[in-house]
């Protein structure tokens, strides 16, 4: 027996689409194709968050990731200590800069277009290199420190583990190393 599904059409039209289940990015040297960027206020915590969603093009961590895996990174911009917000804002700037053409001027409009819109984000479709290193804070807490770098188009299309730059300090933000000073971390 069938029913008239049109009586649910308005609810379906106004519903938020289900998201692809993604794992958090782990340690390793990865090239990620950005599939979307979502900016939202968490229903659970009330915090403003930016979620970078992507697919692994290649990785050095073949134990935890493989080509084609769907991954995400979250950046909390409210409800956390100010030092953490500042760290995430710096990382988001680095991500946007890595996806813009070299020498492009970074404007508030470009930042807004890049960090929202889901699959319509201005950086959706771009590739980025993300380096995650296991570290221990001065208070003994384990964490993964992430840095970001531009990926040349020809590398993004055919990148392999053998193409990986071995020195993570090659990841730059405006010519400076991206990684922060671990002594600044309060945990």
Image (tube, grey):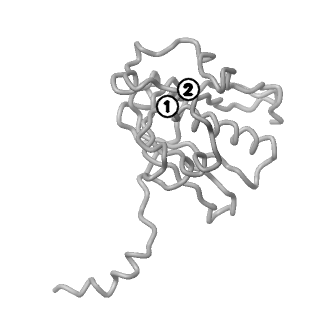
Q: Which image quarter: residue 152?
A: top left
Q: Nearer the viewer, residue 175 or 40?
A: 175
Of the 4 image quadrants, the one containing the N terminus is: bottom left
* Sooner in the amino-acid sequence: mark 1 or mark 2: 1
Kindly identify the residue that appears in the image at 27 percent across and 83 percent down.
5
Check disc 1: other Cα within 10 Å, few if <14, some if 14-19, many if 20+: many
Q: Position of residue 117 (x, y in %)?
A: 50, 56
Which picture quadrant has residue 171?
Answer: top right
SS assignment at label 2: strand
Residue drawn at x 43%, y 32% is 65
Residues under numbered marks 1 and 2 in contact, where contact means CB atoms less than 8 Å apart: yes
Residue position marked by numbered label 2 in the rendering: 149
Is residue 155 toward the left or the right of residue 168 in the image?
A: left
Separation of residues labelled 1 and 2 (CA atoms): 6 Å
Rendering coords of residue 39 (x, y %): 58, 55
Asked whether 160 or 61 is in front, the reply is 160
Residue depicted at x 80% and y 41%: 83
Q: Is residue 75 above or below residue 99?
A: below
Give above or below for 89 relative to 44: above
Image point (46%, 41%), residue name: 71
In this picture, residue 122 sits left or right of residue 79: left
The circle drawn on residue 79 is none
The residue under label 1 is 128
Residue 78 location in percent, x, y?
73, 54
Note whether 63 is above or below 126 in the view shown: above
């Amino acid at each position: 027996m069938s029913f008239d599904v049109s009586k649910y059409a308005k609810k379906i039209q106004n519903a938020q689409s289900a998201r692809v289940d993604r794992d958090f990015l782990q340690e390793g040297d990865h090239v990620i194709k950005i599939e979307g960027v979502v900016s939202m206020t968490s229903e659970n915590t009330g915090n403003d968050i930016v979620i970078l969603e992507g697919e692994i093009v290649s990785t050095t961590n073949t134990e935890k990731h493989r080509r084609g895996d769907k991954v995400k990174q979250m950046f909390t911009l409210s409800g956390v200590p100010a030092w953490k917000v500042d760290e995430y804002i710096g990382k988001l700037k680095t991500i946007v800069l890595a996806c813009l053409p070299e020498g492009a001027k970074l404007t508030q409009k470009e930042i807004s277009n890049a960090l929202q819109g889901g699959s319509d984000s201005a950086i959706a479709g771009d590739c980025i290199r993300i380096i995650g290193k296991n570290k221990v804070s001065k208070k003994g807490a384990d964490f993964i420190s992430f840095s970001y770098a531009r990926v040349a188009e020809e590398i993004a299309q055919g990148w392999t583990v053998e193409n990986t730059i071995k020195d993570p300090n090659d990841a730059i933000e405006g010519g400076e190393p991206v990684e922060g000073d671990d002594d600044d971390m309060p945990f």
